[in-house]
Image: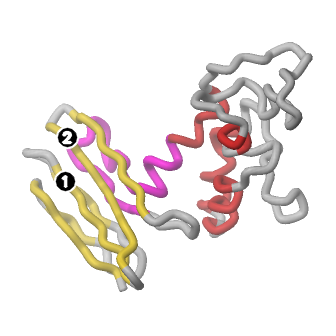
Amino acid sequence: MEKNGYRIGTGFVGTPIVADALTDTGHLETAARLLLETGNPSWLYPVTMGATTIWERWDSMLEDGTINPGEMTSFNHYALGAVADWLHRTVAGLAPAEPGYRTILVAPRPIAGLDHAEAALDTPYGRARVAWRRTGDDVVVEADVPPNARAVVRLPGAPQETVGSGRHAWTLG
């Protein structure tokens, strides 16, 4: 990643798994740098070019503003947007701990370059939500656990715990 300037070099198959692979092997900071890179190719390059949708190609619009003359130049395509799943599960920290979200996993991983993240989902039990925000040197984490559900909570530097339904908050120093 470093040799490539933290620019993504995957296609449809590798894109959904590259951030998880980096995170699972202890390279969360590298995954964060890859996410926040703005050079071409990257997830944020299209944003620098005015995109409000996910493109089919990393370079559907070229740096000079012209449209890539190659085939496969959709400006509304899902595949490269698969990083959103990693953002929900890993950065914001909301994932199922068991099928159906009766038990949710609250495990945010705040990354450098972001001041806050939030994910919410309407589960069969109600709305589940995890959010974090930086306040000075601390990170405040909030979680809403729906009725008749529970959450396994894994916070950086803290022992794992299980909480019941309701609104919960933690401050990480």
N-terminal of the pair, mark 2 or mark 1, is 2
For the point 58% across and 31% down, the residue is: 52
Residue at 19% from the left image edge and 53% from the top image edge: 144
Element class at badge 2: strand
Amino acid marked by disc 1? Asp
CA separation in Å, label 2 and label 1: 7 Å
Is residue 166 left or right of 23 when viewed as pictured?
A: left
Amino acid identity at mark 2: Arg
Asked whether, in this view, residue 96 is left or right of residue 84, the answer is left
For this rendering, which residue is in front, 134 or 64?
64
Q: Is residue 123 above or below residue 154?
A: above
| Residue situated furthest top in the rendering | 71
Q: Looking at the rendering, which quadrant does residue 14 occupy?
A: top right
Placement of 9 over or under 111, stated as above or below: above
> Which quadrant of the figure has residue 59?
top right
- The residue labelled by disc 1 is 144
Q: Position of residue 123 (x, y in %)?
A: 23, 35
Q: Do the residues labelled 2 and 1 touch (CB within 8 Å)?
A: yes
Q: Is residue 119 magenta?
A: no
Q: Nearer the viewer, residue 128 or 33?
A: 33
- Span of residues in magenta: 85-108
Whole-percent x, y for residue 7 in the image: 80, 51
- Say which residue label 2 marks: 127
